Structure formats: structure tokens, C-alpha cells
Image (cartoon, rainbow, N blue to C red):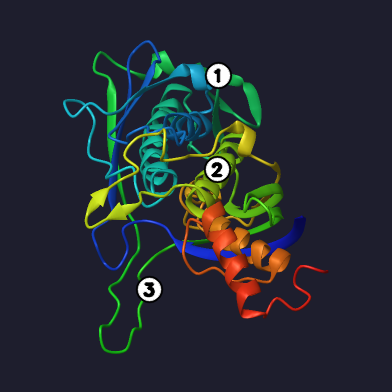
Amino acid sequence: MKKRGKGMAAAFYGTGYGNGFPDVSTAKVQMNNRGQVSVCIGATEVGQGAKTILTQIAAEVLGLEMKDIRLLCEDTDTSPDAGTAAASRQTYNSGNAVKKAAEALKNILLERAQKHLELPSAHGLAVEDRQVYLKAYPKKRVHFRELVGEEPIRVEASFVAQTTPVDEETGAGAPYWPYTFCCYGVEVEVDTETGIVEVVRGVCAQDVGRAINPELIEGQIDGGFAMGLGYGLMEDLHLVQGEIKHNRFANYLIPTALDMPELEKMIIEDPESTGPFGAKGIGEPVMIPVAPAILNAIYDAIGIRFYEIPVTPEKILAAIRKRKKEGNCGNDFER
């Protein structure tokens, strides 16, 4: 017999290292006399889209297209330290560092353009298409390359996340900033004869601050859901006296595309004032509520609460047999 159930779970997550640990990202931005822009930062790309996001941020500040930006990262010879690709911090921390450096470069261009265009102030100047122009009189403009001398313009900027240690006695403090929020709802189908649980539908509402790249956000949600699904239902190391028995993918199961349900993604935008253009990091938060939501849905379907994961078919069947043996099933399998 197949039983359906629905479950929800919500989470809040503090991004960055937290608890007063120094959380610093540094970026360098350079422009040569051909108007070409390079961004150097040690932000590692591990599939989360850091290279795309950081390029977008620099391009937005400088009024350029992404193809106009050369991003140099993961090279310790040229790129300053940006911290680890962990704690969902790169968009927020390194994004802020790139934004600050790009803004510093932009200000130098505006000051030089003011003198070149013989204007009384830099007020009202803007950048687009490798040019600085006067918004009130757009014909008055100058190309970036005319503003750079023999030596390239080089600027460097750092961003330090705001975090304070928690008081060990009172528990008070601001260990993380900013926080992001996420909620999942899922519907499962539990086969009471085989113990197999299928997630048939899911919905995710994720607070992102501001969506710099909505497609990357949706990709993060898909990836986070897949990881949470595996965490909750499949991925069992089967540790026996310190030895991992499931030590190959033949017996350590992970989700495939066929295990993924229809997943509705809701991007919630409430710009974070301290974030780059209002953005927050969401790499890890999109995974956290998945397994709890699935376990709640299983409970809704068969009336049995599980407290250990993964909830494998063997555990489902064992719990059903125990319930029947104890004679406590009531109407759980009749509804």
C-alpha cells in the first residue's frame, strides 16, 4: 500500500565564519591604458558560481559587460586572500570586496574625467560602455583608455564581516551576520510493502537578500535539495566498529536525476543593506531543511516518527513491523 504525506521544515542560517573569527576578503582591480579591466581575488570556484557572481558585480559597478571583465582567481601569485569557499560567504564577503575595489577604481576614473572634460566637479558623471559621460549632457564624454596613463590604475580593497563572540556565560552576542532564511515543503509517497520513500513534489522559499543571478540561485536550490534528499533517505556509510562498510558507490547510494521531484523554487528578495547590491549567500542553507521536511512528511504518511537518518527502506519496514507487533497501529494504515 502506498501512503502519501506532506511535511515542512524551516531554517535560519548565519553566513560566514562567525563568533568573532576574522572574516576578511581582499580584492584587487586593475585597468590598463587600453581600458581593459582585471579583477584579482582568491575566491575559489567549487561550483557555486563565484566566478560568475564576482564578474557580474564588477561589471555592474563599472558599467561594463561581463565579457569586458577578466577575473583572476585561485592563483596565489596574483590573487589576494579571500578566505575559504565555505560558510556560504563568498557572494557576501568577496562580493563586497570586489564591489569596494571596483568603486574605488570608478572614483579615480571620475576624478580624472572631471579634469579631462574641464568640469567644475565630478557630480553627475556616470560610466557606461568603457566611457565616462555627463548625465546632463551625454555628448560630453571620454573613453576609459584616455584616462589611464602609461601605468595601469591599480586599487585594492578589503571587506571584513561584522561578527562578535558569544558570551560564554550568558549566550549573548551577534555571532553571525547576516542571517538568511529558508523553508521547504515536500510531499512523499511511502510504500508500506517495500519501505521505499519517493519524494513526489517539493517547494522551496529561499531568502536571498537580492538575486544577483536568479538562474544560479535556482541551481543552488536544485543542488541543495538533491543533497538533502540523499542525506535524509539514502546516504548511509554503515559504520561498524569504526570501519566504513559502504565504501563504494555500489552500496553508498546518492540521488540521481530520476530521484528528483518536481521542485518549485520561490526566490524571496529582501535586500540586505550590508550586502553587495543587497545579496546574501545561500550555498548551504538550501540543504538544511530538506531532510527534516521529508521526515515530517513520512510521519504524516504512516504515523511513525524517525529520529535517525537516512530513513532507508529497511528502517521503514522494521518500524512498521514493530508497530504492528505492538498492536499500536490504530488507524495509521487505514486513513
Q: Is label 1 in contact with label 2 (beta carbons under 8 Å)?
A: no
Drawn side of residue 334 relative to residue 309, left or right: right
Q: Which residue is mark 1?
A: 129
Above-or-below relation of 183 to 69? below
Q: Residues within 10 Å of mark 2 (few under 14, many from 20)?
A: many
Residue 146 visible in image: yes
CA distance separating discs 1 and 2: 41 Å
Q: Nearer the viewer, mark 2 or mark 3?
A: 2
Locate residue 293: give its quadrant: bottom right
- Residue identifier under label 3: 174
* Kind of residue at disc 1: Asp
Q: What residue is shown at x 48% (from left), y 29% (from top)? A: 52
The amino acid type found where label 3 is placed reads Ala
Identify the secondary structure beneath mark 3.
loop
* Vertical comparison of 237 with 40: above or below: below
Left of 300 or right of it: where is 96? left
Tell which circle, 2 or 3, labels the residue nearer the N-terminal end. 3
Name the quadrant of the N terminus. bottom right
| Few, some or many residues within 10 Å of mark 1 (<14, 14–19, 20+) | few
Would residue 202 be found to the left or right of residue 213 on screen? right
Query: Residue 245 lies in what quarter of the image?
Result: top left
Give the amino acid at mark 2.
Ala
Q: Is residue 214 visible?
A: no
Q: Earlier in the sequence, mark 1 or mark 3?
A: 1
Q: Secondary structure at mark 1?
A: loop
